[in-house]
Image: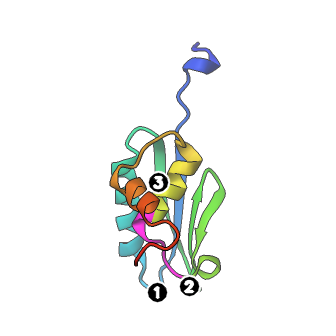
Amino acid sequence: MPSAGNVRVVSRIAIEYCTQCRWLLRASWMAQELLTTFTTDIGEVALIPGEGGVFRITVDDAQIWERRADGGFPDIAVLKQRVRDRIAPQRDLGHIDRDRDSAGPGAAG
């Protein structure tokens, strides 16, 4: 049996989406983006049908995005940063991180 230091911990991401609002395509696109970016850090992405305008994303049961609380849907770059911060904080997201760093205070937008 491998020691705790050799066990790779992978995360579970859940995307709960409103079926009444027909947000399955948006949820599945976000799932695809996350699986492509975090190939070995994610063990599962679950798409969970819901109702009442729900759009909630959790990583290992910790909420990282909720449509009403966060004001709409996440930009994919922001979503990837929030997931990275939870599951692989040392990971560089390439241009996503460089774009964020260059858009500091006073940057033209």
Q: Residues within 10 Å of mark 2 (few under 14, many from 20)?
A: some
Instruction: Report the Cα–Cα distance between label 2 and label 1.
Output: 6 Å
Residue 99, located in which quarter of the rendered image? Answer: bottom left
The residue under label 1 is: 21
Q: Residues within 10 Å of mark 3 (few under 14, many from 20)?
A: some
Residue 54, located in which quarter of the rendered image? Answer: bottom right
Residues shaded magenta: 72-77
Residue lying at 35% horizontally and 49% vertically, measured from the top left: 94
Placement of the N terminus among the 4 image quadrants? top right
Number of marks = 3
**Which amino acid type corresponds to the residue marked 1 in the rendered image?**
Cys
Along the viewing direction, whichever of 34 and 2 lies nearer the viewer: 34
Placement of the C terminus among the 4 image quadrants? bottom left
Residue 46 image position (x, y, % from top left):
49, 57
**Which amino acid type corresponds to the residue marked 3 in the rendered image?**
Val
**Height in image: 20 above or below 29?**
below
Question: In the rendered structure, are the residues bearing label 2 and label 1 in contact, judged by CB atoms less than 8 Å apart?
Answer: yes
Which numbered disc, 2 or 1, marks the residue that appears first in the sequence?
1
The residue under label 2 is: 53
Residue 62 image position (x, y, % from top left):
66, 56
The residue under label 3 is: 45
Chief secondary structure of the magenta portion: loop
Residue 17 image position (x, y, % from top left):
50, 74
Please tell me whether residue 73 belongs to the stretch shown in magenta: yes
Instruction: Report the Cα–Cα distance between label 1 and label 3.
Output: 21 Å
Left or right, 20 with respect to 95, comes to right
Instruction: Report the Cα–Cα distance between label 2 and label 3.
Output: 20 Å
Question: In the rendered structure, are the residues bearing label 2 and label 3 in contact, judged by CB atoms less than 8 Å apart?
Answer: no
**Which amino acid type corresponds to the residue marked 2 in the rendered image?**
Gly
Left or right, 79 with respect to 64, comes to left
Which numbered disc, 2 or 3, marks the residue that appears first in the sequence?
3
Furthest residue in direction front, as rendered: 106
